[in-house]
């Protein structure tokens, strides 16, 4: 960054009579002008991160911070009578759905921060994840036209566009580069689809509805579109720099596949090497096997991609052929290695006229990683057990992380300054130094209470403006913010709150510290039960908030349109982070890490990265409850029957609240469907598939214990600080260093 020139230009900028959007675009353009160029990649080894999602959030403040001019910009604008916070009206670039997409964004941030050559490749969706509105308690979806504010942080590279061919159409992939600022400027390259005959549709929506054949084909087109554009670019670059010696390709390039969505890149890679460059199939396969690495993000069976052969053949016949041929090689190799029929079948890439993309990924990838210790163990023992036996060195763990720049320095300036005061500023450059806080938590408690109160005050002021619910910053604040999914068990939290409400009303619960529960969540538009849970939460919130006999002690708010910018406020202003997924089902979670780093205790199950959070920060500083993975397995083996839980009046009352008419689902039948899913089972799920009723009583006990402990505010603040002091491990700087050393072998 040429800071001097930037500040000069900013000082000279005429801001009179300009609206916020114009100012946003002009200031961003100035920063882009003086920021410097994306660092060259030639001659060195680079890593490429292929992802369907990059949940970037707002770039403005983050980029100015990374460029080192945020504070000066604030001051200059102030002199011109402009509050820098006005740009909060500019909406997020939500080119992602949740944790997986946010992880991709955190990784790019950390790599740039560490000076490592990691570049992102994905899709420039015209519309990102829908904007959520709540009408009468129900979620409704509005298109997220994020580009209507302009896109000053991207540069269109017209001359680098390339043609992507399907059997029935040709599409241009036009790259837009977003620089990722840090010690090094890396590239996030997002492709936009252009051309005739509906070409633009390919990059129109993130996750188009795929309940029809047309929808499924569109999804496949998206995956192929950006994968093919990336792979062709990297091969061209290699030929330009090193000639047609593809044996050295893997010396210069490593391609990380973020979940299975871009696995088709490996097939396209082999297709190009064999068809265009005339390599023997076995040679091309060998190069691919040394180039690709794969990250698994979920063990939920419904999320493991497979493609019907006739769909693939219809639009990508050569890719179908390549995948079948890979399958032949895999079977041959596995049989030669001594695998039996069942074992070969368990690892099948192509079986019953279907392609199994996770199996393809595991076979092709030189490294397969899970995203938290427990998750990786589950991959080894269950999901990919046969592959693990056959390829024992392939599966490894890389526990996720979050960038402490956005998730602490940017979103919590006050706490960051307190840390500076206590241990100096070194931690900002080297997050491992944050552990110096460990010995100082007792001494910092009073000041931390003040910081937390200030962050709460700001959060609650924002919540009051946006949601119309007023809450005092003296409340104890719990938050469960994440995608709405049955396995994440927002319904269990709703039941727990309801039970506390009944307890307060009847006088069974006394000495209760005033508490607020914040929910934030989007449901997939076609996921009926998730949408019913949103309605249920809004129903109980309305009832409790309106009940004068209780609402001085208990409040509930469902924040609308939860996204990265809302998350930045919520993680800083929360006391208790609710991470209550069914044990074994949350691969890692990263929301849990954001809260921890901002000094919240975790109330959660032994799942995903919660286990490592508790290991680092101490069981005494967190609140763990509920069935563990072993318990869940035992219960399943025994044949868990939720009817039995109804013997406990707590569970009975919770379940009945769905059907006794106390709350209205507006005649949709949604609540009855939830009830049935708990007691009869729904679609292919067994009754209470996620053990909501089973874990509910212990959850309520944990929440009440937290509430009681909070009355000693000082001791509670020390617990919170102990979490922050031990959170360095969860910076994605640590994760990226591990990837760089153990999978990518890249250097600054
Ligand atoms: C961090 C983040 C997530 C992931 O949250 P989990 O609790 O790990 O599921 C999802 N959405 C947004 C906007 C986030 O910032």
Image (cartoon, helix red, strand yellow):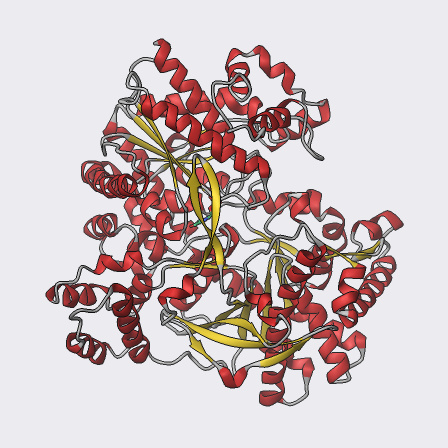
Q: Position of residue 322 (x, y in %)?
A: 79, 70
Name the image quarter holding residue 315.
Answer: bottom right
Q: Residue at x 61, y 84 (%)?
A: 236
Name the image quarter holding residue 670.
Answer: top right
Q: Position of residue 684 (x, y in %)?
A: 71, 35
**Residue 42 seen from this side:** no
Indicate whether 457 appears above or below 404.
Answer: above
Q: Residue at x 69, y 61 (%)?
A: 217
> Between 200 and 250, which is closer to the camera in this rendering?
200
Q: What quarter of the picture does the N terminus occupy? A: bottom left
> Between 35 and 588, which is closer to the camera in this rendering?
35
Q: Residue at x 29, y 22 (%)?
A: 553
165 sits to left or right of 533: right
Indicate whether 747 appears above or below 94.
Answer: below
**Residue 419 seen from this side:** yes
Label total for image: 0
Q: Position of residue 693 (x, y in %)?
A: 56, 22
Q: What quarter of the picture does the C terminus occupy? A: bottom left
């Amino acid at each position: 960054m040429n800071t001097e020139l930037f500040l000069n230009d900013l000082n000279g900028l005429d801001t009179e009579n300009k609206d916020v959007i114009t100012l946003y675009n002009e200031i961003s353009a100035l920063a882009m002008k003086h920021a410097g160029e994306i660092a060259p990649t030639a001659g060195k080894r680079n890593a490429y991160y292929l992802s369907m999602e990059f949940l970037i959030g707002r770039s403005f403040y983050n980029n100015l911070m990374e460029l080192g001019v945020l504070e000066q910009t604030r001051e200059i604008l102030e002199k011109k009578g402009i509050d820098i916070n006005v740009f909060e009206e500019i909406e997020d670039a939500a080119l992602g759905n949740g944790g997986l997409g946010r992880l991709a964004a955190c990784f790019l941030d950390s790599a740039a921060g560490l000076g490592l050559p990691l570049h992102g490749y994905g899709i420039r969706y015209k519309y990102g994840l829908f904007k959520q509105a709540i009408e009468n308690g129900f979620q409704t979806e509005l298109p997220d036209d994020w580009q209507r504010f302009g896109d000053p942080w991207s540069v269109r590279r017209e001359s680098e566009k390339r043609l992507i061919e399907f059997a029935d159409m040709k599409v241009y992939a036009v790259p837009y580069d977003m620089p990722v600022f840090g010690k090094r400027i890396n590239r996030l390259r997002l492709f936009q689809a252009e051309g005739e005959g509906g070409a633009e549709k390919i990059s129109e929506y993130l996750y188009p509805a795929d309940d029809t054949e047309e929808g499924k084909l569109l999804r496949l087109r998206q995956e192929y579109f950006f994968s093919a554009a990336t792979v062709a670019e990297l091969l061209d670059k290699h030929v330009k720099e090193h000639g047609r010696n593809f044996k050295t390709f893997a010396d210069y390039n490593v391609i990380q596949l973020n979940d299975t969505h871009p696995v088709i890149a490996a097939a396209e890679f082999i297709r190009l090497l064999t068809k265009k460059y005339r390599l023997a199939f076995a040679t091309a396969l060998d190069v691919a096997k040394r180039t690709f690495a794969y990250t698994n993000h979920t063990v939920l069976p419904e999320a493991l991609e497979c493609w019907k052969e006739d769909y693939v053949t219809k639009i990508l016949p050569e890719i179908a052929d390549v995948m079948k041929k890979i399958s032949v090689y895999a079977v041959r190799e596995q049989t030669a290695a001594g695998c039996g029929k069942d074992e070969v079948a368990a690892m099948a890439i192509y079986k019953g006229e279907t392609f199994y993309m996770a199996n393809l990924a595991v076979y092709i990838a030189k490294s397969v990683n899970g995203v938290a210790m427990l998750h990786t163990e589950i991959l080894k023992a269950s999901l990919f057990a046969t592959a693990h036996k056959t390829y024992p060195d392939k599966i490894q763990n890389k526990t996720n992380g979050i960038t402490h720049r956005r998730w602490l320095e940017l979103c919590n300036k006050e706490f960051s300054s307190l840390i500076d005061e206590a241990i100096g500023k070194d931690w900002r450059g080297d997050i491992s130094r944050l552990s110096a806080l460990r010995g100082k938590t007792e001494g910092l408690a009073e000041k931390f209470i003040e910081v937390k109160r200030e962050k709460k005050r700001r959060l609650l002021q924002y919540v009051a403006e946006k949601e119309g619910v007023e809450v005092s910053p003296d409340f104890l604040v719990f938050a469960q913010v994440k995608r709405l999914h049955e396995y994440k068990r927002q319904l269990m939290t709703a039941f727990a709150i309801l039970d506390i409400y009944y307890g307060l009303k009847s006088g069974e619960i006394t000495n209760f510290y005033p508490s607020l529960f914040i929910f934030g969540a989007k449901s997939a538009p076609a996921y009926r039960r998730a949408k019913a849970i949103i309605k249920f939460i809004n129903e109980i919130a309305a009832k409790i908030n309106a009940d004068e006999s209780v609402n001085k002690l208990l409040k509930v708010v469902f924040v609308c349109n939860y996204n990265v910018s809302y998350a930045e406020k919520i993680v800083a202003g929360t006391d208790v982070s609710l991470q209550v997924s069914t044990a074994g089902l949350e691969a890692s979670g990263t929301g849990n890490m954001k809260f921890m780093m901002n000094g919240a205790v975790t109330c959660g199950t032994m799942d995903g990265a919660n286990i490592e959070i508790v290991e680092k920060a101490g069981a005494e500083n967190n609140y763990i409850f509920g069935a563990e993975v072993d318990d869940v397995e035992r219960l399943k083996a025994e044949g868990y029957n939720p009817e039995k839980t109804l013997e406990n009046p707590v569970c009975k009352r919770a379940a009945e609240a769905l059907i006794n008419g106390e709350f209205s689902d507006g005649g949709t039948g949604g609540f009855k469907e939830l009830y049935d899913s708990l007691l009869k089972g729904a679609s292919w799920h067994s009754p209470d598939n996620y053990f909501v009723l089973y874990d509910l009583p212990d959850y309520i006990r944990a929440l009440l214990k937290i509430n009681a402990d909070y009355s000693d505010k000082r001791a509670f603040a020390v617990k919170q600080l102990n979490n922050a002091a031990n959170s360095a491990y969860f910076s994605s700087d640590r994760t990226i260093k591990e990837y760089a050393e153990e999978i990518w072998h890249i250097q600054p």
